[in-house]
Amino acid sequence: MKLAMILWLAHTLPQPVADPMCLATTVYLEARGQSEIGQRAIAEVILRRRDSGRWGDNVCAVVTAPGQFAMATLSPNQRLIEPAAGFTAARIALAMAWNWSHARREIVPGATSFALSSVEAAAGRVVGRIGDHTFYRSSSLAMR
């Protein structure tokens, strides 16, 4: 499936259906080769950003904000070709959405961004490193 199809669905489907799809797709694109805990941490950053309202008030708006996540930076012609990784990302996305709204067990407390550990990231305090990603907390992100 091409990313273009997922982007179209994200704007067409009702939000309660589109958000888990956007979360799963972003986890897949950003961290499919990482451990489950690393993929969960990516989802946590996305959900925290949604709660802040700075990038949008739903997951699809957050992950498609210009220049922020792979859904907005990759070519729409990008193909998602690893079905097992897609299934894992979907399972993790659903579990994290439930966790975030019920138990809120944080993996990277306060993290509002991440970058590949080999890339120097924007200003922020390092919260942790998981796999190939370093997670940061920005002091300028006000939670609502």
Image (cartoon, rainbow, N blue to C red):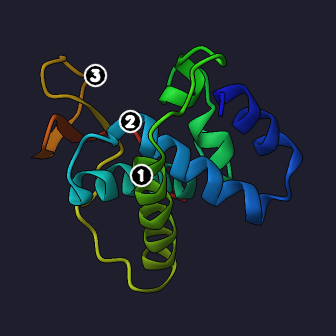
The residue under label 1 is 84
Which residue is depicted at the point 18% across and 17% down? Answer: 120
Along the line of sight, the residue nearer the viewer: 142 or 93: 93
Residue 95 appears in the picture as rendered = yes
Which residue is depicted at the point 43% across and 68% down? Answer: 96
The residue under label 2 is 30
Q: Residues within 10 Å of mark 3 (few under 14, many from 20)?
A: few
Q: Provide the secondary structure element on which disc 2 rests.
A: helix
Q: Which numbered disc, 1 or 2, marks the residue closer to the eye? A: 1
Q: Quadrant of the N terminus?
A: top right
Disc 3/disc 1 C-alpha distance (Å): 32 Å
Q: Kindly identify which numbered label has been placed on residue 63.
A: none
Residue 70 vertical position relative to residue 138 in the rendered view, above or below: above
**Which sits earlier in the primary sequence, circle 1 or circle 2?**
2
Residue 49 rendering spot, x and y as whole percentages: 49, 49
Q: Which numbered disc, 2 or 3, marks the residue closer to the eye? A: 2
* Amino acid found under the numbered disc labelled 1: Ala
Along the line of sight, the residue nearer the viewer: 64 or 21: 21
Q: Residues within 10 Å of mark 2 (few under 14, many from 20)?
A: many
Along the line of sight, the residue nearer the viewer: 4 or 20: 4
Disc 1/disc 2 C-alpha distance (Å): 15 Å
The residue under label 3 is 122
* Amino acid found under the numbered disc labelled 2: Glu
Does residue 54 appear to the left or right of 107 in the view shown? right
Disc 2/disc 3 C-alpha distance (Å): 17 Å
Residue 108 appears in the picture as rendered = no
Q: Provide the secondary structure element on which disc 1 rests.
A: helix
Residue 73 rendering spot, x and y as whole percentages: 53, 18
Which residue is depicted at the point 23% across and 64% down? Answer: 107
Residue 29 vertical position relative to residue 35 in the rendered view, above or below: above
Residue 48 rendering spot, x and y as whole percentages: 45, 56
Q: Provide the secondary structure element on which disc 3 rests.
A: loop
